[in-house]
Each structure stands twice: as structure tokens, then as C-alpha cells.
Image (spheres, rainbow, N blue to C red):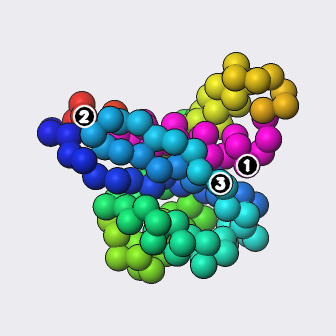
Amino acid sequence: MTTSNRTLLGFDFGTKSIGVAAGQEITGTAAPLAALKAVDGIPDWSKVEALFAEWQPHLVVVGLPLNMDGTDQQVTHGARKFANRLNARFKVRVETCDERLTTADARARLFELGGYKKLDKQKVDSVAACLILESWMAEQLYS
């Protein structure tokens, strides 16, 4: 598959915090943005709208939290619902991506950068969103 120069947004869905990252398909990289506070998985939609206005993504990737054996867990339904709402509200293609172990990887990456003081919950969520987005882009290159 050829790489294009599309702008992407990635989300690490959570019931209290939703990590956000912006990425460029041409480089296959993503950068963390400020995480969104959520109440029972529902963000302040005006802040999501502002993200879409600023970044104008061609595609959105939402991490799909699965059990280690690949089965759904309680929060999987919420992530799918969030993905569907993004699609309905912003009329943009939304993909989901297996996010197993991304939070652990994000913690490890942040710890390497600055020890325990870097392990702020919202930073972890947004770095996890980067890993989700980068993982999705890498998958597209090799599929």
C-alpha cells in the first residue's frame, strides 16, 4: 500500500480520560495532545469539535481495549460506541485498532523519559493514543 500524506487523530478511550494524538501518515509518527476528561466515557464534545476543527483529520483511529485472549472486556463496548459517535458527528472514517499493552508501553516510555514524575495519568493516556495510531499506521504499511 502506498503511504499518503493524510492527517490522523488517534484516541485511547477511557471512562475518565481519553488520550489523544495527532499523526501524519507520510512519516508514520504521532505526537501526544492534551487528554480529554470524560464522565462515564463521554467527553466534552465541544473540545472534541475543537480538535477536529484544528487538525481536520482525514481518518480517526480509536483503540479497542481487548482482553489478552482477544475477547471483549467491559470497556470495549464503550470504545466502539465512542468510535461510532465520532463517525456520526464528524462524518469522518473511523477505524479501530487493537490496543492491548499500549498503556503498559506508554508508562515504560514515559518512565524512561523522566521517571515516576512523568507518569501523569493523562500523559500516559495520550502517549498510549500515539502508540495506537503508530501501530495502526504500521499495520497499513504491511497489509
Whichever of callouts 1 and 2 sits on the residue coming sooner in the sequence is 1
Label 3 and label 2: CA atoms lie apart by: 27 Å
State the SS at label 2: helix
Residue at numbered disc 1: 122
Residue at numbered disc 2: 141
Mark 1 burial class by Cα count in 10 Å: few <14, some 14-19, many 20+: some
Q: Residue furthest right?
A: 117
Nearer to us in this view, 75 or 103: 103
Q: Quadrant of residue 103?
A: top right
Prevailing secondary structure of the magenta residues: helix
Q: Depth-wise, is mark 1 or mark 2 nearer the camera?
A: 1
Query: How many labels, in total?
Result: 3
Q: Quadrant of residue 82?
A: bottom right
Instruction: Give how far across and how far down residue 96 sits, in percent.
Output: 43, 53
Taking the image as drawn, is residue 89 in sight? yes
Q: Quadrant of residue 35?
A: bottom right
The C terminus, quarter of image? top left
Label 1 and label 2: CA atoms lie apart by: 29 Å
| Relative vertical location of residue 86 with respect to residue 107 in this rendering, above or below | below
| Relative vertical location of residue 96 with respect to residue 29 in this rendering, above or below | below
State the SS at label 1: helix
Say the numbered circle drawn on residue 99. Answer: none
Instruction: Give how far across and how far down residue 79 sits, in percent.
Output: 56, 61
Three-letter amino acid code at the position of disc 3:
Ala
| Relative vertical location of residue 85 with respect to residue 83 in this rendering, above or below | below
The N terminus, quarter of image? top left
Three-letter amino acid code at the position of disc 2:
Leu
Three-letter amino acid code at the position of disc 1:
Gln
Mark 3 burial class by Cα count in 10 Å: few <14, some 14-19, many 20+: some
